[in-house]
Image (cartoon, rainbow, N blue to C red):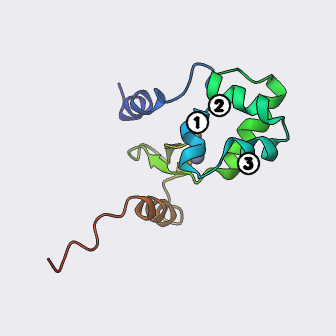
Amino acid sequence: MSARDEFKRRHRNRSTLTGMVDLKPWLAVNGLTVRDFALGIDVPLRTAEGWVSRGVVPSPVNQDKLTEYVHTHCAHYWVIAVPDGPSSEGICQHCGHVREFKNSVEYTPMVTKARDTNGKNVEGKSGA
Ligand SMILES: [Zn+2]
């Protein structure tokens, strides 16, 4: 098994049965309420509450809207797989969105920066 497959296996089990983002924790992470969410994709609040709280599966049309909303509003937190060939696969830990990251010089600094912003614990341990 390649490192990439291992990575996928480890990070995929967050997704729900439908393959959709787990809305409740996603909204919490992004500081959004169900109302914001309902307004954002233009569905009745009760409908959105059904998806978030009762696990109702949206219609295909609404799933598209929902996915688009999530991808637009998510403060993506990419976890990038170990470099393996010309590109690496990154999976957002918040919404489960997958995208390819090119392992080239011009892209790498951007990726590194994004990860540092979210996981900074390194600085500030001096001066005890
Ligand atoms: Zn995301």
Residues at circles 3 and 2 in contact by the CB criterion of under 8 Å: no
Q: Is residue 123 something one can see in this rendering?
A: yes
Q: Which kind of residue does numbered mark 2 sit on? A: Val
User: Callout 3, which amino acid?
Assistant: Asp
Residue 55 in picture, x, y percent from top left: 64, 22
Badge 1 element = helix
Residue wearing tag 1: 24
User: Looking at this view, is 87 or 68 the one in front?
Assistant: 68
Mark 1, other Cα within 10 Å: few <14 / some 14–19 / many ≥20: some
- Residue 36 badge: 3
**Dot 3: what SS?**
helix
Question: Residue 107 location, x and y as percent?
Answer: 53, 62
Q: How many marks?
A: 3
Whole-number angstrom distance, CA of label 1 to CA of label 2: 5 Å
Residue 67 horizontal/vertical position (percent): 71, 37
Look at the numbered disc 2 and give the secondary structure of its residue.
helix
* Quarter of the C terminus within the rendering: bottom left
Between 4 and 105, the one nearer to me in the picture? 4
